[in-house]
Structure formats: C-alpha cells, structure tokens
Amino acid sequence: MSTQKKTVASPSATASSSTIDRFFHITERGSSIAQEVRGGFVTFFAMAYILVVNPIILSTTLPAEAGFAFADIAAGTALVAGIVTILMGLVANFPLALAAGMGLNAVVAFTLVGGNGLSYQEAMGLIVWEGILITILVLTGFREAVFKAVPRQLKTAISVGIGLFIAFVGLINAGIIRPGGTPVQLGINGSLAGLPALVFVFGLLLTVVLYIRKVKGAILIGLLSSTVLAMIFQAIFHVSAMKDETGEIVNPTGWGQTIPELSGSIVSLPSFGSLFQVDMFGAFSKLGPVAVVLLIFSLMLADFFDTMGTMVAIGGEAKLLDENGNPPRSREILLVDSLAAIAGGVGGVSSNTSYIESSAGVGEGARTGLASVVTGLLFLASTFLSPLVALVPTEAASTALVFVGFLMMMQVADIDWSKAEIAIPAFLTIAFMPFAYSITVGIGVGFVTYTLIRIAKGQAKRVHLLMWLVSILFIVYFLLGPIEALIG
C-alpha cells in the first residue's frame, strides 16, 4: 500500500500571503500573487528602455564641466522611478508604473536647454514648479474634478487612442515603420530587412500564438524569448547600432536604441550625481516671469492630460473602472503622479509620469498595486544591474507594446458610433494620438470638438463647466507658438 505526502504551506507563509492579499485586494479583483508578480515583471521590461533612452536624451545637454554624466542620470532615472512606482502601488493600489516621461525629457533637452538657453539645473527647476502646481490642483480636488467631468465614452476613446498610439510607438521603436518616400513606410523602402526586424517579428508572432493558445505569461515569454534570440544573433553576427553618437543613421538594418550584448560585469555600483541638480529661480531672471509661466503651463498641460488618459486606459484594460469610467482611488493616483513630477525634477532626471507601458503588465493579469511594487523593486535593483537591463533591445520590448495595443483597441466596441456628437470627438481623439504622436494632442482635439458640437446642437448647457474651461485651455495650448511670438 503506497502513501502520498501532502505539501502543506507553513502557517507563517499562509498568514503572510493572506496579509498581502487583503492589503492589495488581490482576490477581490480576481487576481493572484503570482499573476501580480508576473505583471510587474512584464511592465518593467516594457519600460526598461527608459533607463538607457532618458540619459541619452538628457546627457546631450550637459556641458563638460557639469560634474555628472550619463551613468549618473541612468542611476537617478532608475532610483526615482523605483521610489515613485512603489509609492503608486502602496498608496493608490493601482497597477501603474512611473518613470521619466518621454516627450517631457525631450522638452527639457531641446526646448528648455537647447531652445531657451537655460542651464540643466534651471530646466529641472521648471519641472519642480510644474509638479508643485499640479500637486496643488490635486489637493484642491480640481484635477480629479476635471477627470470626472469628461463623458464616459470620450474616456473610452482616449483609451482606444492610446492603444493605437503605443502600437505605433512600438512599431517605430522596432524600426518596422519608418519615415521614407511617404511620411511613413514599412521597414526599409517597403521591405523588412535585418536581424533586429526578425527579432521583432519572431517575438510578436510567438506572443500571438501563445495568446491564442491561452498560455499564461504570453507577453512576457514573447519578450524574453525575442531578447534571447537577439543575444544569439548579436553573439554570432555582431550587428552594429542603427545610429551613431550624433543621431545619424549609419546602419539601417542595425539595432535601434540598445545593443543586446554584455561587456564586462552584469553588476555595477551606482553613482547618483544627478540628484539635487536643480535651480528653482534662475529661469525667472534669465527669461522673465511671463515666458516662464507659459513654459510651465505647457509642461503642466502635457503632464496633466497624459496621466488622465493613461489611468483611464489602464483602468479600462484591467476592468477596474466604475460605471462613470473612473478608476478606484483616482485622487491617490493623481497625487502620486503629481509628486513624481517633483521627484523627477529634484532627482535631476526630468518629470516622472505614469507610463502607458503599464498596460503590458495589465495584459498579463496585473490588477493591483502589488504589480507596481514589483516593478518599482526591479527599478531599484536596476541601479546596480544597468548592464543587464540594457540587454533588452527595443525590438524585443516593442512586441509587448504592439500586442497590448490590440488588447486596448478592443474597447472601441463600447463607443456608440451611431451618435455623431460622441462618434466624431471619439474618432478625432483616436486618430490624433498616433498621427500627432501625442496623447495630449489627441485628448485636446477630442475635448474641443465635443464642446463645439454640443454648442452647434444647442446643448451648451449639457457641457460641464470644467469641460468648457479645459477646452479653452487646450485652445491656448494649441496656439502657444503664436502667443509666445506675439508676447516676444
């Protein structure tokens, strides 16, 4: 007679698991600890490119005598992202990760420093002021009130538009879609060429097959498998980068933003020289108060509505929105995001903001803040493991973005396309995000169009007062160039 031993979890392990479950409402949201951990890993790998790209963009503005450089910005980027992402998980219990904002870092480098002649520290000072202003708007309830004033189906359109936007970003980053004889085209002269393109195609098709087969972790498996393939290709064929140090294309079939090969140790001690590189008042004396206010306003508006669109998209994908299209703890989400902007400025790494790449983790089942805590811990670990993180090429990470774009696009069925007053603003919101390469522009066009249509139908009273205000602000935002020229 044979006997079988049963494996019984220790009381302490069970109690610990139960405590985590209760704190994050994991079971209540239809998830599991394993699912949250997996989602946190996927989000991290989908965002890991920022650890390389952010210092590349910001370090171009540093003078030789700055006293800190690429490695300091890379470590600071990981440190700040880790802290604010963990804060999002613990305070807001929402599967949303944060890091230095793409677009906002370009504004710092090429507009504030390159265009307006500010020093690196003065530019970071404006980032801190922008964060302080948005934090005040959150604490007074204004930012949340604006969010709740937006009609539900317009929020859905924002989510769908972001899906198309991140899919387009993924295709651009992977080099599958590029500028050419037409505004954009497939690969090189209409054809896919090069091993990096093969890595992307392999990863995306593998993800699709695994998803259709209902394999858990399809997105993560696809991402990691394509990274391994990229490393194998690089070890055999030694493919160079697509661009040189000046940004010129020297090898069209080369790797995009990172080369998947390891040189030296996988561990390095971090240097945090970018921290506290901030001058709060230098820009006011250099540019004058009016110009500074306009710059802060443009930064604030972009940050304000990018986050709104992102949290709706993540909440919709995770099925966490209420009947009005609002996620749980929306004020806490917005507060952490606002504080992250301040943290990014103080950390000398540009404004930190909510990342739509979090949808990759949600696509893997993340539903709670535990996933954000996992992502944040990985960011903190990456301050020591930056050589290892840099192994993930954008061609591999982009597979997750493109596939999640499909998952988010499915929400388009929730929009009532039979009603023009909803369908037209929804369409323009969805279209302008990828075409203008800006979440903020898409939201702004949708808001202004929605308000105009209600006026045309004699329904101006049905437009929320805050929608009126925000629409006017967006009109100012769209005309900032002529306004600045007129004032100047």
Image (spheres, rainbow, N blue to C red):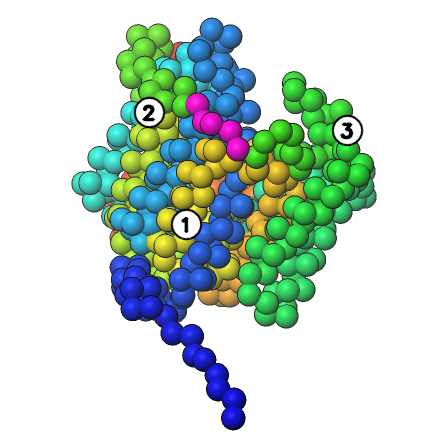
Which kind of residue does numbered mark 1 sit on?
Answer: Val
Q: Kindly give the residue lying farthest to the left in the view shown.
A: 140
Q: Kindly give the residue lying farthest to the bottom in the view shown.
A: 1
* Left or right of 281 on screen, residue 110: right
- Where, by quadrant of the figure, is residue 32 drawn? bottom left
- The numbered mark, 3 or 2, whose residue comes first in the sequence reads 3
Q: Which residue is mark 2?
A: 346
| Residue 162, disc | none
Which kind of residue does numbered mark 3 sit on?
Answer: Asn
| Residue 374, disc | 1
Mark 1 surroundings within 10 Å by alpha-carbon count, few (fewer than 14), some (14 through 19), many (20 or more):
many
Cα separation between marks 1 and 3: 37 Å
In x, y percent, where is residue 294?
35, 22
Tell me if residue 269 is in the magenta stretch: yes
Front label number (2 vs 1) = 1
Foreground of the two, 398 or 150: 398
Foreground of the two, 465 or 34: 34
